[in-house]
Amino acid sequence: MIFKKEKILLEYTLEKCSNCKKDNKRKYQDNDLLFSKCGTCSSCDGELFIERIFSEEVS
């Protein structure tokens, strides 16, 4: 008998500062939209935008 191992995926959002280009990876939230403003940068007070939404497999 062959068993399939179920894959577990965790979703993340990558935020990027428009000023200093610093990246911040955080857990995905339901209201995240690509290229939308999501806050201010903690380093330079620039605007943070959502650059990427992705998932990673947990082993």
Image (spheres, rainbow, N blue to C red):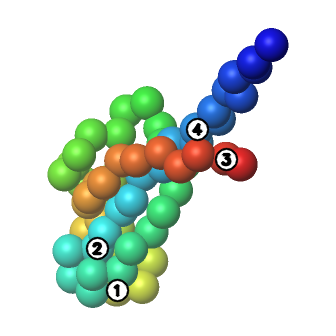
Q: Earlier in the sequence, mark 2 or mark 3?
A: 2
Q: Is residue 46 visible?
A: no
Badge 3 vs badge 1, beta-carbon distance below 8 Å: no
Name which residue type carries label 2. Cys
Cα gap from disc 4 to disc 1, whole angstroms? 32 Å
The Cα–Cα distance between marks 1 and 2, rounded to whole angstroms, is 9 Å
Q: Secondary structure at mark 1?
A: loop
SS category of the residue bearing label 3:
strand
Disc 1 target residue: 44
Q: Within 10 angstroms of label 2, few (less than 14), some, or many (20 or more) residues?
A: many
Q: Tell me if residue 20 comes above or below residue 54 in the rendering.
A: below
**Could you tell me the amino acid type at mark 4?**
Leu
Q: Nearer the viewer, mark 2 or mark 4?
A: 4
The residue shown at (37%, 33%) is: 31
How crowded is the residue under tag 1: few (<14 C-alpha within 10 Å), some, or many (20+)?
Answer: few
Mark with earlier residue (3, 1) = 1
Amino acid type of the residue that numbered disc 3 sits on in the rendered structure = Val
Q: Indicate which label's residue lies in the foreground, 3 or 1.
A: 3
Residue at image mark 3 = 58
Q: Which residue position holds label 2?
A: 17
Residue at position x 65%, y 35% in the image: 8
Gap in angstroms between the C-alphas marked 3 and 4: 6 Å
Residue 9 has which mark? 4
Marks 3 and 1 sit apart, C-alpha to C-alpha, by 33 Å
In the displayed structure, 29 sits above or below 48; it is: above
Q: Quadrant of residue 23?
A: bottom left
